[in-house]
């Protein structure tokens, strides 16, 4: 039986029996097969973009140049050191064409300027995505294991952080996020180890709770635990979303667990108690003179926080602390908390009474008005202890009888490479790592009410900064070859020694000043102070600090040092804090010829126009951004002035004084002029 | 034409063709309607009914902020609708629009009791100037509008901003705050704010880098402008120029570039 089909086949076979015909057909089929690859290539997405690009530039005035720069075909960058294969510039054709900087049409826009060469560096190191892919979908949006989608622009700064562990000038958000990880104590629970092996250290300085009953009441602890921001808007402690009962139990435990420590509390000094009641304006002015606001903020009438954030906010502090504790604290804060940043002010008894009364008067009666706790029971205390362990309170605070837990929260050292498939998303959430982190930080309990991660009072911009600081913690950052790693400059463990060292520890100089790579940044670096100042000036300054820069609001407080103490400090500073760059007595302090002084004066006022920022003659000069120089000849050494003029940044890195490339001769004349500006010199001599 | 059995086939085919054409037409029509409907639903939040109208929009705070591309601006934009006498108008409708890629929350609102609206802005993903427009209907059926510039700064411009904040703004910015006291008033020759596009846009890249690197004296200007060529690196000078270009008002347009119509 023959169907028509087999008939057709048979006739085909018959047709092909001729070898010439067979050859013809086979070659035709082969040819067809051979065209598949070029055709696929021709119709590929990237080819489409390249054709579109050529059409796009053909209408431009700079078409010829652009066409000359254009290379067709797949463009690949290979960085074996970082195991990166990058073909992005196959479609992003105009990436390095400066004239396409303002083009809105993607993928043709030029890349904005960055400190790396695009043609060597490629795209995926910063933008993530799959470099080897040649379609938009695969390159930008993959969610598969081992692949990562493109990083949204708002987290771009995070990519710099994979190699650069220190702050960069152009990445404010990353820098802010990193500071926040330390300042808000994230790293107390989540350890973050950087590729160079250093562990990120917290800077939040949480107080020990061992003697907390000396300091405050159970009611305050309860209110604070319920919502730290109700007490202080700038609280760094997060909200653990505790139930009333849990907060009450924890407060009961903390009070019961606290041991009294003799010296943590003290009555008002007898002399002060029997005197007249403290005058509130005198208290306020002592608070001002002592520059408490350099570190502590208070809320003003308009509700804005005014002051520094090195210490806790003091708006409602009177509602928190016991007066006996406050007096003792003001006398010697290191007794209660040896690691405090607060200096020992050495106030007299009368001053102590004034300042304590003033600080104690900052109250908010509403805060505790509705807190009524029944006396605690042993069961409550036991439950409170269980909760304290459960919530990891000891990760930050020192608590008697509870050890600091190791790795209380998950380790975040490689969080930036966490594959999306390993994350749990809530319904409706965008399925990306940044979205996950954002949700986790801003609404930690939305992933489950029994989780322990607390909620911080962050603005959306702050959350964005923290996420930006977490994303660079990637596998890549650990696999970088050493020559590409840029570790952060680590804080040293510098400690001043001897008697002066003890004194400086009491005064906590390093809370504000930096010395030999350790310390705060509020006040000048003192590492080379001994090369720069004259002894009588330093002694007088320590006795009664005045400001050199009229425009500054933060100033050095007065510490009521004795003569002997001042001598110890002055000797130590002048002998030890020396720059290796020059000898402090290399140039004479006096004896410059009037001609040279006059020449310096002219250079000062005309060639270098120093008066735009400095005042030498108060009757005529107005600039007050730089230090006042009216008595500079009695303050600084001539050698310091000379070398500072030659290269300010070498002696004070980051100073705003520009390096004017002053010749040796000019610098010497300017030094002569400035050294003639002595204290007590007559107005005529000053001119 | 009469339909006969002989030309029936032809008529049927014609009818089928017209039906098909009609079908396509209908499909196209419904598709357009659908898409219009969708777009309508997307753009039109429930229309707000103005309880009052004003005659001017003023910025209370939050304009001219500098943010990273794609990010939320740190401060909210606060706008106020005023009447002829300059008094705040509560209950007026205020709408905000911006260039592609931005998010505006809310894009439309009624002014509160103080006549103000607070808006959170997220910039688009590429660096540059982001002009937002606020509009509000006035009493005469017209609209009043106001342009609000915000800036997305890429790496280079962020560096420039930093350089400016460290070295330049004390003299070039006359705004004085407690934290950053300005030196502007103390200068015998007054420098221009970097936003003054009518001054800086006339200066070429070479002019700018020359005066920054070599100081006012080198170009026969006042010595009060110091030379920064030994303090700042070349990339830092480039960076501060790119920052000056970014914030310039009117916007800077480099010569020889072809600009997209926005």
Image (tube, rainbow, N blue to C red):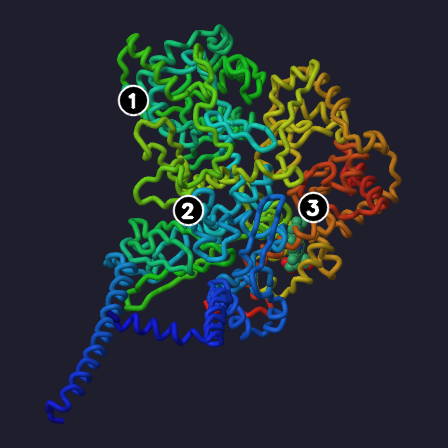
Residue A477 visible, this orientation: yes
Percent from the top left, x then y, of residue A192?
Answer: 52, 30
Would you name the residue on which mark 2 appears?
A143
Q: Are marks 1 and 2 on the same chain?
A: yes
**SS category of the residue bearing label 2:** loop
Q: Decide: is A79 above or below B96.
A: above
Residue labelled with disc 1: A369
Name the foreground residue: B66 vs A356.
B66
The residue lying furthest to the top in this view is A262
- The local crowd at label 3, few if under 14, some if 14 to 19, many if 20 or more residues have their Cα within 10 Å, is some
Q: Report if residue B193 is visible in the image.
A: no
Q: Return the x and y of residue B78 as percentages of the image width and height.
A: 39, 51
Which sits in the foreground, A670 or A240? A240
Q: Nearer the viewer, mark 2 or mark 3?
A: 2
User: Of the residues under marks 2 and 3, which one precedes in the sequence?
Assistant: 2
Mark 1 or mark 2, which is nearer to you?
2
Chain letter behind tag 3: A
SS for callout 3: loop
Number of numbered callouts drawn: 3
Real-space Cα separation, disc 3 to disc 1, in angstroms: 56 Å
The one nearer the camera, A500 or A617, is A500
Which chain letter matches label 2? Answer: A
Q: CB under 8 Å between callouts 1 and 2?
A: no
Indicate the chain on which mark 1 is placed: A
Residue, x 24% and y 69% (percent of image)?
A1
Q: Residue at x 76, y 27 (%)?
A: A578
Q: Of label 1 and label 2, which has the lower sequence position? A: 2
Q: Mark 1: which secondary structure? A: helix
- The reply to whether discs 3 and 1 touch (Cβ–Cβ < 8 Å) is no
Which residue matches tag 3?
A621
């Amino acid at each position: 039986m023959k169907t028509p089909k087999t008939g057709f086949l048979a006739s085909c076979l018959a047709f092909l029996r001729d070898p010439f015909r067979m050859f013809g057909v086979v070659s035709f089929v082969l040819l067809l097969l051979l065209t598949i690859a070029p055709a696929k290539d021709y119709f590929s997405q990237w080819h489409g973009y390249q054709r579109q690009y050529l059409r796009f530039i053909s209408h431009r005035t700079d078409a010829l140049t652009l066409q000359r720069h254009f290379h067709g075909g797949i463009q690949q960058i290979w960085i074996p050191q970082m195991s990166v294969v990058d073909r992005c510039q196959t479609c992003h054709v105009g990436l390095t064409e400066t004239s396409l900087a303002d083009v809105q049409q993607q993928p043709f826009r030029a890349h904005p300027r960055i400190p790396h060469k695009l043609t060597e560096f490629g795209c995926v190191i910063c933008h993530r995505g799959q470099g080897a892919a040649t379609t938009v979908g695969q390159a930008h949006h993959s969610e598969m294991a081992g692949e990562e989608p493109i990083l949204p622009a708002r987290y771009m700064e995070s990519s710099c952080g994979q190699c650069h562990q220190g702050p960069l000038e152009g990445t404010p958000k990353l820098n802010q996020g990193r500071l926040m990880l330390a300042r808000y104590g994230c790293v107390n629970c989540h350890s973050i180890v950087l590729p160079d092996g250093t562990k990120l250290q917290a800077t939040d300085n949480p107080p020990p709770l061992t003697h907390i009953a000396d300091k405050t009441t159970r009611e305050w602890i309860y209110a604070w635990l319920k919502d730290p921001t109700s007490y202080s808007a700038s609280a760094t402690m997060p909200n653990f979303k505790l139930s009333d009962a849990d907060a009450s139990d924890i407060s009961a435990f903390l009070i019961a667990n606290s041991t009294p420590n003799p010296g943590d509390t003290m009555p008002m000094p007898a002399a002060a108690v029997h005197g007249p009641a403290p005058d509130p304006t005198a208290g306020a002015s002592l608070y001002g003179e002592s520059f408490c606001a350099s570190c502590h903020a208070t809320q003003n009438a308009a509700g804005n926080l005014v002051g520094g954030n090195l210490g806790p906010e003091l708006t409602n502090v009177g509602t928190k602390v016991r007066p006996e504790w406050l007096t003792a604290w003001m006398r010697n804060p290191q007794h209660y908390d040896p690691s405090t940043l607060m200096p020992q002010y050495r106030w007299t008894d009368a001053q102590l009474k004034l300042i304590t009364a003033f600080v104690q008067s900052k109250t908010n009666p509403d805060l505790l008005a509705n807190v009524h706790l029944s006396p605690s029971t042993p069961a409550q205390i036991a439950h409170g202890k269980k909760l304290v362990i459960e919530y990891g309170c000891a990760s930050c605070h020192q608590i008697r009888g509870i050890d600091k837990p190791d790795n209380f929260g998950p380790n975040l050292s490689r969080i930036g490479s966490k594959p999306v498939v390993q994350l749990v998303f809530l319904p409706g959430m965008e399925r990306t790592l940044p979205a996950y982190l954002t949700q986790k930080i801003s609404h930690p309990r939305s992933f489950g009410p029994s989780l322990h991660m607390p909620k911080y009072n962050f603005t959306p911009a702050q959350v964005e900064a923290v996420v930006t600081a977490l994303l660079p913690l990637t596998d890549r950052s650990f696999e970088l070859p050493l020559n590409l790693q840029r570790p952060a400059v680590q804080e040293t463990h510098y400690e001043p020694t001897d008697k002066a060292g003890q004194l400086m520890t009491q005064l906590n100089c390093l809370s504000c000043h930096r010395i030999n790579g350790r310390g705060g940044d509020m006040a000048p670096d003192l590492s080379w102070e001994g090369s720069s100042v004259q002894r009588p000036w330093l002694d007088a300054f320590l006795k009664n600090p005045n400001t050199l820069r009229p425009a500054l609001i933060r100033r050095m407080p007065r510490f009521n040092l004795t003569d002997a103490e001042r001598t110890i400090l002055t000797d130590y500073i002048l002998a030890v804090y020396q720059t290796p760059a020059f000898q402090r007595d290399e140039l004479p302090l006096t004896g410059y010829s009037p001609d040279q002084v006059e020449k310096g004066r002219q250079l000062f006022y005309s060639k270098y126009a120093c008066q735009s920022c400095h005042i030498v003659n108060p009757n005529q000069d107005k600039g007050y951004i730089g230090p006042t120089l009216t008595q500079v000849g009695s303050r600084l050494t001539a050698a310091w002035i000379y070398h500072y003029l030659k290269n300010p940044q070498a002696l004070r890195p980051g100073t705003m004084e520009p390096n004017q490339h002053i010749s040796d001769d000019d610098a010497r004349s300017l030094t002569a002029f400035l050294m003639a500006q002595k204290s007590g010199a007559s107005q005529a001599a000053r001119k | 034409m009469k339909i006969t059995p002989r030309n029936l086939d032809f008529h049927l085919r014609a009818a089928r063709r017209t039906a098909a054409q009609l079908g396509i037409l209908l499909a196209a029509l419904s598709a357009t309607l659908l898409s219009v409907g969708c777009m309508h639903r997307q753009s039109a939040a429930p229309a707000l009914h103005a309880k009052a109208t004003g005659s001017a929009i003023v910025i209370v705070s939050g304009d001219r902020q500098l943010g990273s591309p794609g990010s939320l601006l740190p401060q909210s934009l606060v706008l106020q609708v005023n009447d002829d006498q300059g008094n705040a108008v509560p209950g007026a409708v205020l709408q905000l629009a911006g260039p592609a890629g931005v998010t505006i929350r809310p894009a439309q609102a009624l002014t509160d009791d103080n006549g103000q609206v607070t808006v959170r802005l997220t910039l688009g993903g590429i660096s540059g100037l982001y002009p937002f427009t606020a509009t509000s209907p006035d009493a005469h059926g017209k609209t009043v509008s106001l342009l609000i510039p915000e800036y997305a700064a890429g790496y280079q411009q962020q560096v420039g901003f930093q350089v400016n904040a460290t070295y330049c703004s004390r003299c070039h910015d006359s705004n004085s705050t407690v934290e950053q006291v300005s030196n502007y008033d103390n200068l015998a020759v007054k420098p221009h704010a970097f936003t003054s596009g009518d001054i800086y846009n006339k200066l070429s890249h070479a002019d700018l880098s020359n005066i920054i690197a070599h100081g006012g004296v080198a170009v026969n200007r006042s010595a009060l402008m110091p030379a920064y060529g030994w303090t700042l690196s070349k990339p830092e000078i480039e960076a501060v120029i790119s920052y000056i270009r970014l914030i310039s008002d009117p916007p800077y347009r480099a010569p020889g570039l072809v600009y997209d119509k926005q």
